[in-house]
Amino acid sequence: MQEQHQDYLFDLQGYLVLKNAIAPEDLNAMNQWVDNHQDYIETPGDKENTRWIGGVETHSYSKEDGVNFQNIVAGDPVFEKLIDYPTWFGLAKKYINADINGLSIHENFLNVRGAGGHLFIHCGGHAPLCYLTFRHHNTGEWMVGQINVLIALEDIGPGDGATVLVPGSHKATEIHPRLVVNGRGVTSRNDMAAEGAVGMQEMHLKAGDALFFTDAITHGSAERKNDGHRRVVVYRYSPRFIRSRFNYELSDDLLQRLTPEQRNIMLPIPPRPIPG
Ligand SMILES: O=C(O)CCC(=O)C(=O)O
Ligand SMILES: [Fe+2]
């Protein structure tokens, strides 16, 4: 797509669909990784006793969310590549305005979600969360506070529990009706799947497509009705000033393998030892 068209659409609707974002061999490698870790999907551990695969932690917010393999970057070299994958990296840098704001990854995980799983809608232009900024006041200078890249590892169609977006809602000042509680917009959890939320659109994807969206948009996911599991990978990009969500320490091996630019993104403000 022409850059001007892409910029216009990202500003207007708050998301872009990047078709065939992932090279087939990388897609295979990621699916192979999931196939090799089925046991962790069946038995992910619980909140007190999470299970680890080297530097990757299995984690869940609730049964419906499915299993998150947090810090997936430590799971396999293919996930290291995603840090600055050419399909979206330039876009993330441009919209966050990395020249001025730097760039970091707030969180990176692989999510596997089975039948009955879903995610309640959250976020929106109304929410006073500092990382939900979305500024582009005709100055040619973007300033987006958080961008999610959600990669479909397999086709996601009707009944598969697709991500749901409310296009344009990153600019809403009205609170999404489902998020109003006692006159205020909530950011807390609710138990409803995204189905039926006013203005919503299910984002069906082909394996290897990426949904690139501002975290400020109202979004969630439909309930998975089909058998099997939905497999997605999420990399969340932020300015360097936003701290990482779980602050996993990266192993020396991993840090050694990363390029200087990748290291800067994963560890934008390295700890500064105090002499003595
Ligand atoms: O699971 C989904 O489809 C939505 C994920 C989500 O809310 C996010 O990446 O911020
Ligand atoms: Fe989200």
Image (cartoon, rainbow, N blue to C red):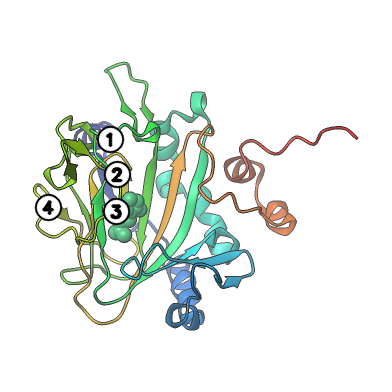
Q: Amino acid at mark 3?
A: Arg
**Quadrant of the rendering where the C terminus is positioned:** top right
Q: Determine the CA span between mark 3 and mark 2.
A: 7 Å
For badge 4, the amino acid type reads: Ala
Pick whichever, 246 or 164, lies toward us. 246
Q: Which residue is mark 2?
A: 187
The amino acid type found where label 1 is placed reads: Ala
Within-10-Å neighbours for mark 3: few <14, some 14–19, many 20+: few
Nearer the N terminus, badge 4 or badge 3?
3
Of mark 2 and mark 4, the one earlier in the sequence is 2
**Are the two marked residues, 1 and 2, in contact with CB atoms closer than 8 angstroms?**
yes
Residue 259 at x, y percent in the picture? 65, 47
Local secondary structure at mark 2: loop
Name which residue type carries label 2.
Thr
The residue singled out by tag 4 in the image is 197
- In the structure shown, which secondary structural element does the residue marked by tag 4 occupy? loop
Indicate which label's residue lies in the foreground, 1 or 3: 3
Residue 189, disc: 3
